[in-house]
């Protein structure tokens, strides 16, 4: 039987929030990914970058205090740095985990750009929350710099950036070639580096693309057999967080749309995952989406856990 071609989308749990947390988290993540390789999946991996890109952006901005005439790196450059930083940790830990299991397989990260529409509504009203909580004083400094912040009552303030819709994955042919050669590819990290086409040039945009949106697009562009979204919960739930919360073991696209209309999925967390699932399944109706947590994925691929969404 031929290998199942899958896009695996990794969320915050897979990476942690700091440099040291990431070192530890990717070792656990590598085990879950290696389980999939052993189960005969060909993996194209994509991942979150909210905490990482925000940390890098802050560090790059703070360098103004150290160097005279310093120009802070724009968000698109920080996004590129976050792909390198996260990809580097995932590729090395997965390579080592595979070698420990006697599997020698190239794992590489592709610096990926994704085109966006300069007139995307998201640029007029940024809504994507990134990074850690800040004090009111730090939030006021961000606002003075021209950045947007949002208050989470009782918790503090966080940066908010535009999250335009992904249009085209610029390096898709390179990703396709490595996937076709049965290599493990890490691509479109952090949603991809958002770029705007200007004739032959690609100009970086000040934005962060939603990683769930790009995971759905990557899976459909590659006509993958499956999209596996690894997140913090083992299942998608109906009435999440309420007394009558119920795990959803299976969902069709039509049922998912009804649940969206009923407001069952929180914006910015579960909603973009369900939307990604729908957009992939509408283009690849024979495909399958699995949403589960890292510690349930081994059971989930045997049909013993997780939410499975089909057309
Ligand atoms: N209906 C739902 N079922 C399950 N989780 C939900 C639901 N609605 C909102 N969530 C939230 O979605 C979160 C997962 O999304 P998110 O925090 O963005 O994780 P990730 O970093 O993995 O993308 C869960 O921890 C949960 O709080
Ligand atoms: N780019 C992105 O969606 O990252 P997070 O999942 O960290 O928000």
Image: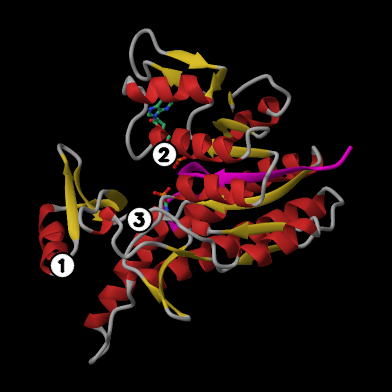
Marks 3, 1: nearer the viewer: 3
Task: Give the distance between the C-alpha atoms of the residues marked 2 and 1, in whole angstroms.
Answer: 27 Å
Secondary structure beneath dot 3 equals loop
The image quadrant where one finds the C terminus is top right
Secondary structure beneath dot 1 equals loop
Residues marked 3 and 2 touching at CB (< 8 Å): no
Q: Residues within 10 Å of mark 3 (few under 14, many from 20)?
A: many
Tell me the quarter of the picture where residue 227 sits. Answer: top right
Task: Give the distance between the C-alpha atoms of the residues marked 3 and 2, in whole angstroms.
Answer: 13 Å
* Count of numbered labels shown in the rendering: 3
Q: Which mark is residue 272?
A: 2
Question: For the magenta stretch, what is the residue range?
Answer: 1-18
- Between residue 272 and residue 223, name the one nearer to us: 223
Which residue is pictured at 66% across the width and 38% down the height?
226
Q: Which mark is residue 164?
A: 3
Marks 2, 1: nearer the viewer: 2
The yes-or-no answer for disc 2 within 8 Å of ligand 1 is: yes
Q: Where does residue 245 sit, x and y in percent of width and height?
A: 40, 13
Tell me the quarter of the picture where residue 78 sits. Answer: bottom left
Q: Is residue 215 visible?
A: yes
Q: Which residue is mark 1?
A: 146
- Residue placed furthest toward the right: 1
Which residue is pictured at 63% across the width and 46% down the height?
7
Secondary structure beneath dot 2 equals helix
Marks 3, 2: nearer the viewer: 3
Answer above or below: position of 72 versus 225.
below
């Amino acid at each position: 039987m031929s290998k199942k071609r899958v896009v695996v989308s990794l969320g915050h749990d897979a990476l942690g929030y700091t440099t040291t947390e990431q070192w530890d988290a990717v070792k656990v993540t590598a085990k879950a990914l290696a389980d999939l390789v052993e189960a005969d999946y060909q993996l194209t991996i994509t991942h979150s970058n909210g905490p990482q890109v925000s940390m890098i952006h802050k560090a790059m901005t703070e360098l103004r205090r150290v160097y005279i005439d310093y120009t802070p790196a724009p968000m698109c450059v920080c996004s590129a740095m976050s792909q390198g930083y996260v990809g580097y940790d995932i590729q090395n830990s997965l390579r080592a985990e595979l070698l420990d299991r006697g599997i020698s397989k190239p794992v590489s990260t592709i610096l990926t750009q994704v085109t966006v529409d300069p007139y995307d509504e998201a640029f007029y009203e940024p809504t994507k929350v990134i990074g850690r909580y800040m004090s009111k004083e730090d939030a006021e400094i961000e606002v003075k710099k021209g950045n947007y912040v949002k208050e989470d009552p009782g918790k503090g303030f966080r940066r908010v950036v535009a999250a335009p819709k992904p249009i085209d994955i610029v390096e898709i042919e390179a990703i396709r070639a490595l996937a076709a050669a049965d290599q493990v590819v890490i691509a479109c990290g952090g949603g991809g580096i958002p770029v705007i086409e200007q004739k032959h040039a690609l100009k970086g945009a000040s934005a962060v693309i939603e990683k769930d949106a790009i995971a759905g697009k990557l899976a459909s562009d590659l006509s993958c057999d499956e999209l596996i979204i690894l997140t913090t919960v083992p299942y998608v739930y109906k009435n999440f967080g309420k007394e009558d919360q119920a795990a959803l073991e299976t969902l069709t696209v039509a049922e998912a749309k009804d649940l969206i209309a009923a407001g069952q999925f929180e914006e910015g967390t579960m909603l973009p995952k369900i939307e990604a699932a729908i957009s992939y399944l509408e283009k690849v109706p024979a495909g399958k989406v699995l949403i589960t947590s890292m510690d349930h994925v081994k059971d989930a691929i045997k049909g013993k856990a997780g939410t499975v969404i089909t057309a």
